[in-house]
Amino acid sequence: MFLDLLISGLLAGSLYALVALGMVVIFKATDVVNFAQGEMVMAGGYLGYLFRNVLAWTWTTTILAVLACSLVLGLLLERVANRPLMRAQSFTVIVASIALGIILRNIARVIWTDEVYALAPVLSGQPVARLAGVRLTAQNLFVLLSAVALVAALYGFFQTKLGKAMRAVQQNRTGAELVGIELPAIFALTWGISALLAGAAGFLLAPLVGVSPAMGWIAVKAFVAAIIGGFSSIPGTIVGGFVVGVVENLAGGYISTAMKDIVTYAILIGVLMVRPHGLLGQGLARRA
Amino acid sequence: MRNVKHVASIVLAVAIALLGSGPGAAAEVGVTDTTVRIGVLTEMTGPFTLFGRGVKDGWTLHIEDVNARGGVHGRKIEMIFGDQQASGAKAIAAAKRLIEVDKVFALAGGGITPATVPVIPLINESKIPFVVTITSNPKLTTPLSRYIFRPSVSPDDVNAQAMVEFAWKAKGLRKIAILSGADEYGKGGADALVARLKAHGTSPVAHETFNIGDTNFNSQVLRLKAAAPDAVLVYGFTKEVAIILRQVRELGLDTTVVLSQGTGGALFVELAKEYAVGAYNVWYTGPAIDAPTTPVTQAFWTKFRNRFPGYPPSVPNIVDMVSYTGAMVFEEALKRAGRELTQDKFIAAMETIKNFDPTGGLTNPISFSPTSHQGAKTVRVYQILAGGKTEFTDFIYTPVD
Amino acid sequence: MTRVGLLLAALLAFVALPFVATNYGLYRLNLMAINLILAGGLDILTGWTGQISLGHAGFAAIGAYASGLAILHLGVPFWLATPLAALFCAAVSLIIGAPALRLSGHYLALATFGFGEVVQLTIVHWESLTNGPRGLAIPAPDLGSVRLDTDRSLYFLIIPVTAVLMRLAWNLSRSGMGLALLSIRMSELGASSVGISLPRYKTLAFAVSAFYAGIAGALFGGMVKFVEPGAFSVAQSILYLTMIAVGGMRSIPGAIIGVVLLTLLPEILRGLQQYMELGYGLLLLTFIIFVPEGIYGRVRRWRSHAFPAPSAARA
């Protein structure tokens, strides 16, 4: 059972890591924990459903459209909910992002009701490989490869001029401003990229869990992953995601299934109390 | 100065709070020469709006028909909606408003158990009839309340018994495991499953629970696998169970799966896709699930979609169906009570209804009596086949009272 | 009108009210009063001390279950179970609060969210103690030989308790401690540099707000006579935060406005119910961006512009 718990935990964890990626990108550049990240993931799921099931586009067109629309959504949300609050207190920013999540979730509910929608997987769900007792499907592999591709693309982006400007803002906001980097543009870009990552995550997640307004709840696990990575390190966050997946499996398998989620939250609270900058990140300058 | 401000805001608050509440008077009957007023109490907002929508639309669909025909004994039926918001406190508030301010003749609908069950004492105190169309908790009909009727939805204890008997008798399986949701629906079901197994002199070889909203059920599935059961009885709702069945397949848990009515219906079959093939599901309405595959369900489907276009393809579903026929039962009782309408006569009329099947098979025949307010108790089982098809087995369960 | 005259009139209104209102109106009023207790306590922590809490429904849950279980299993009378449960909440807040007080902003938000979830999950899964998701039926409160099981009798318990607690909160905010809390909110660095002990005051604020939430939870249990874990979710915690953010923090009238508005919002939007949660999210976002001082704060600003006080320092 241990090996099965481990492998399936890594698979589950890869999804948490993917969702957490977008959170960390935003936090590093803007010092904001985006409590609406889960809803941005949900949006990706609905967009996939809209383009594929309702408009019957091809997979390639659907994927491109989901990514493009997610990017635009991120830009829009940044303009509406982040830009006016650039100089506000953290309390205001937190409450604003919570409110944003509520709004996005309820827009989905008003349009599509609380029903769960089925989005077919891109590749088949038939098992193609076995690792210990775990059957891997083509879709599992597709998800893993896509996640790797997204992380690689992100790092590739960071090497570009624009990407470097983003990293500069992440490291030292005042310094970046002083050398002439336009903060609002970078913030918009950051949210756009984060939304793109979230949308991709939602699209990959949807065939596995169904499309519904409650899809965003997975962000809770992503928060824990990001905390473990200290919100400041992308590799740390990815490791964090795997850790969450494996630990919740092991806790459920060996302690009891009732304790599974309590253990996850206990980790969240524990890490926050002992090392708020994460097990793997460095300390961060916080917004006053 | 500050005290005046405080007092002023308090007075303002109180005034607003009491807006719309007149002096308390003895409850009227909610009946005029031309109308009968009923309050539909269900989840209109909140996380379980899924069910409330079906209650609202199902009742609306039929009541509009009734009114188009001129009503019952010259009285049209007026519906006012109350919102439980998935909370006992808010359900009580909404019920009080319907009873005391809107002065309704009867209540209808019901919603999820943790919100609806706390309303029961208020119903009994106010002596108002309540026709429940979707709440499956046994407490609504046991102990018997003179005022509460449940036409179609079979209570969770009966569903659970059917699941156990199907595995035990029909399939001859003995090593039975339980997987239940950690909400009141799952817990209520699990308790009934365990009780029934105990009546057979045995207990589950494994009993795991899962949290609602979770997406990772690997540890539950693997623990069940370690217990090597012949059958797993799953008591939960569509969203989580669809994911569970996928993980059951991925993690190699090969066993007979029996599902509760929470996953019954066409939506689950569509959502769980190939992972549900071979699973069995209990079902408490007629010999067809809620997909428009038989003439009766097709007729209902067409009528519903004409009235409510623009819904997702999974609607109408069983909630709409039982609410629709529940409204028909309500109309029938109004007819039998006669022109001189009182709540007592309505209750007596309900208790005369026997083998009532107005749609020709959309739901099972409904019978009430002075000692039983549970309209239909028969539970069937269907199997999910490849290609999204379903096939009813021969198994039928009727509890012995 | 003299001050005594005003008080007498208020007292008369208070006593006469339940005899002219419906049970439904009284029930609503009682519920609002309970929400006010919780919101008022939360205001001390968030409005005055600037510490965000996304898990306060967890304290209300502890209060409701602790007092309910004490009444059911230990035979403790309601009037004793309630304050004991509230003290228990305060104690719990010390345990989780102490390390959490080093956190701020987002980290505190996440930690308090985690706390609220752990409380809810514990209630759900510790079935032998709490009956899990099926909930607990709680008897109506009895004070000595009097059983309070009508809306009217509950009114006579809940409203005075609310009034006393709110008065105490008001006194606190006007005291030296209130100033200390406010200074912490405005600048932790500044406050500690003038000798205000951050851990001591933050802990106190946390404990007081947890105590208030515990009382609110216990009263809620007694009023509804049924507690179940679903009533104490993160959505509830966010609702309380919304009440004080929209109504106006750091003021009693602000808390009252917030509580009344958000408790009655579903009624105001009757018929448009499917848009209610969306409306509530939009309300929160709009207010937090454009009217961060809340409705009452805006009223205060308008008043001081329209009627400038000769010596503003006195207010």
Image (cartoon, rainbow, N blue to C red):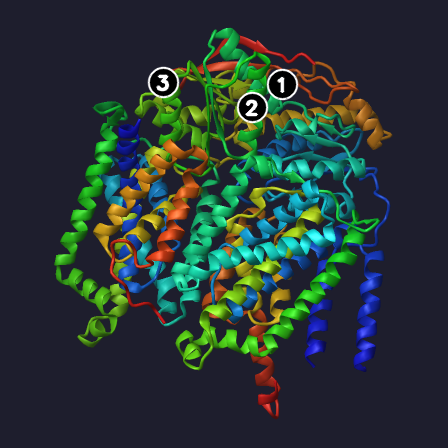
Task: State the CA–CA distance, disc 3 to disc 1.
Answer: 28 Å
Q: Residue furthest front?
A: C74
Q: Is residue A16 left or right of residue B58?
A: left
Q: Is residue A269 left or right of residue A22?
A: right
Q: Chain of mark 1?
A: B
**What amino acid is labelled 1 in the image?**
Thr
Label 1 crowd bin: few (<14), some (14–19), many (20+), radius 10 Å: some
Which residue carries the number 1 mark?
B359
Which residue carries the number 3 mark?
B387
Q: Earlier in the sequence, mark 1 or mark 2?
A: 2
Q: Secondary structure at mark 2?
A: helix
Q: Earlier in the sequence, mark 2 or mark 3?
A: 2
**What amino acid is labelled 3 in the image?**
Gly
Which residue carries the number 2 mark?
B300
| Residue B243 higher or lower than C124, as above or below | above
Q: Are marks 3 and 1 in contact (CB under 8 Å)?
A: no
| Residue C305 higher or lower than C285, as above or below | below
Whether residue C225 is visible, yes or no, is no
Q: Secondary structure at mark 3?
A: helix
Eye-nearest disc, 3 or 1 = 3
Q: Are marks 1 and 2 in contact (CB under 8 Å)?
A: yes
**What amino acid is labelled 2 in the image?**
Phe
Label 2 crowd bin: few (<14), some (14–19), many (20+), radius 10 Å: many
